[in-house]
């Protein structure tokens, strides 16, 4: 019988104060097979993925069990021996491509680094192979794409470049850590097809980490459900979807099914308009990123902005908060003209419009504690004493579902979902009138995301806060948005009550978005790919 390429036995991982993050986890993985790891934020998914390379993130250590790759226990190797395995035998695709690439080096330099370092290809051979992969994955201008820097490409393009970089040294195993979390549904679909094809064509064994059960169902042969560092259930994908045995797994399946159910939300009549963005046009250099876009947000209203990667969603948010220069158009906030430049706005204007960023990895200073991060806007805007700042910070931690002892932690010791909750708490600290939420739950598992959405709705009901929600998750839009605007290539192609946008007849592009939301069943991706010839 063929031996597994990856074998993890009785893995135990603790932090420096002795808390158990992964408790007695075991798994095995054959060549060409995919094991999905799913569970709530902090369940230990990414921790196990990193441990497969005999690596523990800062503040953590492997205290029990062992990891074998092709029969070799890599913890027994020297640091030099382990380095030879990483990248060559096992590679890692991180959750945040933007935070993982070096901004000072071109994409070509970073894609070629691993195969050259491990003597798999010469530099010339690696460059030629990279251009072929850029072309195969339909990246723009493949002959020159590698000359770009990470900030010069979209999130979907950067994620594809990271997948290319991961397989550049022909590894046996790839750990995919939330590779489509921050992508819109249409781009996610393309990346999922890419990953599935790479696994098949290169006979790769893969760990696929995600919080979206419908996504992992399209990729994985087996699914491992984790909670609080322990294995809840490990079965075939078919068994998990159709006959889950454990209560927690049943909750995950049920929650993912109900996320596709439309909930009609009706705004009260004659609500005061607090934000009026009229005829907004903006450029990045010579490229027109927004083309005469107009939206309004009323007091106590949630407006969702949806569209594919590069459609202008985040650019619109940046214009509203004053980070991207207007070419033409007007911004009116609370009945007054709002300066298009952040530096010319009053402190009160800055306080009343807050932004929850898309990528918590790059939005939080890794050198500062959580207490400092959340407490800073409290001190800046309200001039509170140190005791008052601490008290309010602890209240906000409780509001976003984090324990009080996180006050002293740094963001590097937190999971992706926990970081996102810190970003939400920081925005709430300013007591704003309008919160612009740029993918506020993209890093959260289904159950925790639902809690955050309920929290946002609760705050809206209590404080009459308005939200402008930028998201690729149409399930979120269905749940919380009063109105929805659809952007495509910088233009507003559909706008109206969410109940209208999500009911036929659809705008053709809206229909594409709706069809691209993964369904909770096996073979959905294959069937859709066949219909669209992706």
Image (cartoon, rainbow, N blue to C red):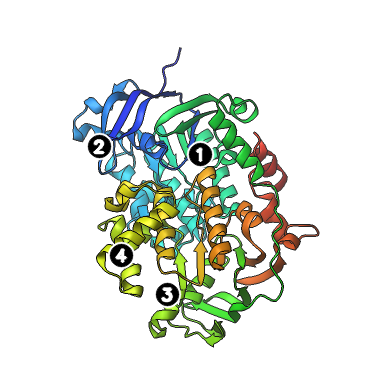
Picture residue at 18% right of the left edge, 30% below the top: 78
Q: Is residue 200 left or right of residue 163?
A: right
Picture residue at 56% right of the left edge, 50% below the top: 188
Nearer the observer, 514 or 225: 225
Which of the two labelled residues, at mark 3 and mark 4, occupies the earlier sequence position? Answer: 3
Picture residue at 31% right of the left edge, 28% below the top: 12
Label 4's element?
A: helix
Which of the two labelled residues, at mark 1 and mark 2, occupies the earlier sequence position? Answer: 2
Picture residue at 35% right of the left edge, 74% below the top: 381
What's the distance in space between the residues labelled 3 and 4, CA to CA? 18 Å
Label 2's element?
A: helix
What's the distance in space between the residues labelled 1 and 4, CA to CA? 54 Å
Marks 3 & 4, CB-CB < 8 Å contact = no
Disc 1 target residue: 198
Disc 4 target residue: 388
Decide if residue 122 is in sight here.
Answer: no
């Amino acid at each position: 019988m063929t031996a597994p390429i990856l074998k993890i036995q009785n893995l135990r991982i603790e932090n420096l104060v002795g808390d158990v993050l992964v408790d007695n986890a075991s798994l095995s993985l054959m060549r060409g097979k995919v094991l999905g790891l799913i569970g709530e934020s902090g369940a230990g998914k990414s921790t196990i993925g990193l441990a497969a390379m005999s690596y523990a993130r800062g503040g953590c250590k492997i205290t029990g069990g062992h990891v074998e790759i092709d029969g070799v226990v890599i913890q027994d190797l020297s640091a030099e021996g382990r380095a030879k395995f990483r990248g060559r035998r096992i590679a890692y695709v991180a959750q945040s491509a933007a935070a993982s690439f070096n901004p000072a080096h071109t994409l070509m330099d970073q894609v070629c680094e691993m195969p050259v370092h491990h003597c798999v290809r010469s530099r010339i051979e690696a460059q030629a192979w990279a251009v072929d992969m850029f072309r195969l994955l339909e990246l723009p201008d493949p002959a020159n794409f590698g000359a770009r820097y990470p900030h010069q490409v979209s999130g979907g393009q950067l994620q594809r470049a990271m997948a290319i970089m991961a397989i550049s040294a022909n590894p046996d195993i790839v750990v995919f850590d939330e590779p489509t979390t921050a992508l819109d549904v249409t781009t996610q679909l393309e990346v999922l097809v890419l990953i599935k094809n790479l696994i098949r064509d290169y006979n790769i064994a893969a760990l696929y980490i995600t919080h979206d059960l419908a996504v992992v169902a399209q990729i994985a042969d087996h699914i491992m459900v984790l909670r609080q560092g322990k294995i809840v259930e490990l079965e075939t994908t078919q068994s998990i979807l159709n006959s889950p045995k454990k209560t927690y797994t049943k909750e995950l399946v049920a929650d993912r099914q109900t996320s596709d159910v439309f909930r009609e939300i009706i705004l009260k009549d004659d609500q005061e308009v607090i934000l009026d963005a009229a005829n907004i046009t903006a450029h990045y250099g010579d490229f027109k990123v927004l083309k005469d876009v107009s939206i309004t947000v009323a007091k106590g209203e949630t407006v969702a902005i949806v569209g594919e990667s590069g459609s202008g969603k985040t650019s619109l948010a940046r214009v509203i908060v004053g980070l991207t220069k207007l070419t033409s158009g007007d911004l009116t906030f609370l009945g007054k003209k709002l300066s298009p430049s952040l530096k010319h706005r009053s402190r009160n204007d800055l306080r009343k419009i807050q932004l929850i960023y898309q990528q918590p990895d790059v939005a939080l200073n890794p050198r500062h504690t959580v207490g400092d991060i959340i407490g800073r806007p409290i001190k800046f805007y309200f001039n509170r004493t140190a005791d008052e700042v601490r008290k309010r910070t602890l209240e906000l931690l409780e509001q976003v579902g984090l324990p009080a002892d996180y006050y002293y932690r740094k963001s590097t010791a937190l999971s992706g979902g926990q970081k996102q909750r810190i970003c939400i708490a920081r925005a709430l600290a300013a007591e704003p009138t309008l919160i612009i939420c740029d993918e506020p739950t993209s890093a959260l598992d289904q159950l925790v995301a639902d809690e955050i959405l309920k929290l946002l709705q609760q705050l809206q009901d209590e404080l009459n806060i308005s939200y402008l929600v930028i998201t690729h998750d149409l399930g979120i839009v269905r749940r919380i948005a009063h109105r929805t605007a659809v952007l495509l290539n910088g233009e507003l192609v559909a706008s109206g009550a969410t109940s209208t946008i999500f009911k036929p007849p659809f705008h053709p592009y809206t229909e594409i978005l709706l069809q691209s939301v993964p369904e909770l069943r096996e073979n959905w991706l294959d069937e859709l790919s066949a219909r669209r010839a992706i």
